[in-house]
Image (cartoon, coloured by chain):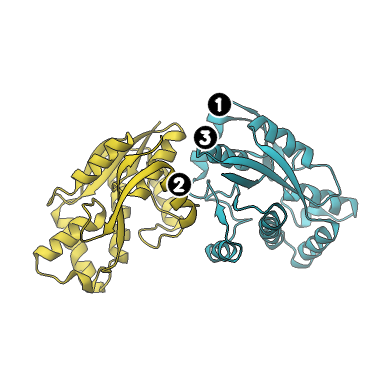
Chain colours: A cyan, B yellow
Amino acid sequence: MICYLLYSGGKDSTLAGIILKKLGYKVIAVNVTFGLYPYYKYAEESSKIAGFEFKTLNLGKEFLEKIVEKIIKEGKVSNALNIIHKTAIEEVIKRFNAKVIADGIRRDDKVPKLSESEIRSIEDRYDVELLSPLRGIGYKTLRRLVEKYLIIKEDYSDFLEKSDYEAEIRQYMKDKGIDIYKYFPKEHKQSRVIGLKII
Amino acid sequence: MICYLLYSGGKDSTLAGIILKKLGYKVIAVNVTFGLYPYYKYAEESSKIAGFEFKTLNLGKEFLEKIVEKIIKEGKVSNALNIIHKTAIEEVIKRFNAKVIADGIRRDDKVPKLSESEIRSIEDRYDVELLSPLRGIGYKTLRRLVEKYLIIKEDYSDFLEKSDYEAEIRQYMKDKGIDIYKYFPKEHKQSRVIGLKII
């Protein structure tokens, strides 16, 4: 069974993929891009290390512009990230004819996070299965599993080569001369998978 | 790493244990009893089949009586089942000095289900990790995984030899001459694991 995994190259989505592989799924890692900057390269590298197939999902510049407008209008990124996540799931279903779609959302994540009714609505409308293998796992357990399975590089968002939803948004806003720290936290530490310990 | 798994012998908690084993945990299945009827035998059999160690956790007759009082007073079982679940987690921590405790709660379960703040409160107060490996898995995915890994026997609660929280409660209430169908659904189908396909 093929599972399309929304993938950033970070520890959460990589660990989600490792669990899916252990359950017998063939994992295709999908990195969301907006087609402006080649940040997907970092996710591609990490996906190779983890033994996943890799694809990009280009949501386009127009979509990015709408997202940036929304962030500026609302003064925060949380709703925008949820919209990207939901759109990404729906586009993976439509473009790749995906039947099983997973993400790396953890128990303690605030955004992006779909509500249970949003999840069920997508499952029913498209006749697909959505999975979040880390949904019942807290930060302490996650830290332990990451230590067991992954070699990661951690740094603050500004300094880490990263392929998550935010990377291109931040770069685009910077290039437009927008002060991103009005909207994004400065001290947000992120991770990138650079090696596997066991698989 | 040892993980204590609240275990009924049904498909959900068995599948949770299989995922935990795949992640490298040594699984000790714990069946909750009230010490009145030997329903735990069925969970013990299933746990052997699944390759888990097995223990019982006797919450006692007095606790059962309070639970039954609550069910009758409230006219429903949902709050009572949540209290049993929470008490079971806390007693596993206290009696077995458990550091990692898991359950078979699924995404679509209504009860028993702890809130995220209840989970975090237990984790912080006792310095433990709580895990729900099926928390991000819906019924369609679960059905597929069950078909892949388990051989199960399914029947309505009244006819299935079962070791979940309800089994002893229902028996106790019946023996007291209480009409259990005022409180429990009649058509509740349950499962019991009687074989493994792969592990």
- The mark found on residue B145 in the picture is 2
Q: How far apart are marks 1 and 2 (CA)?
A: 24 Å
Could you tell me residue A196's position as x and y percent?
61, 28
Residue toward you, A172 or B174 = B174
Asked if the residue under mark 3 is in contact with the one under mark 1, i.e. CB atoms within 8 Å, the reply is no
Could you tell me residue B193's position as x and y percent?
31, 45
- The mark found on residue A198 in the picture is 1
Could you tell me residue B131's position as x and y percent?
43, 45
Q: Identify which residue is drawn at 56% across, 65% down.
A: A124
Judged from the image, the secondary structure of the residue bearing numbered disc 3 is: helix
Residue B44 quadrant: top left
Please report, as a chain letter, where disc 3 is located.
A
Relative placement, left or right, of B83 versus B132 is: left
**Image quarter hosting the C terminus of chain A:** top right
Judged from the image, the secondary structure of the residue bearing numbered disc 2 is: helix
Q: Identify which residue is drawn at 45% across, 60% down.
A: B108
Judged from the image, the secondary structure of the residue bearing numbered disc 1 is: loop
In the rendered image, residues at marks 1 and 3 fall on the same chain? yes
Q: Which of pointers 3 and 2 indicates the residue nearer the eye?
A: 2
**Image quarter hosting the N terminus of chain A:** top right
Please report, as a chain letter, where disc 1 is located.
A
Q: Answer above or below: position of A43 versus B1.
A: below
- The mark found on residue A145 in the picture is 3
Label 3 amino acid? Leu
Label 1 amino acid? Ile
Please report, as a chain letter, where disc 2 is located.
B
Q: How far apart are marks 3 and 2 (CA)?
A: 22 Å
Label 2 amino acid? Leu
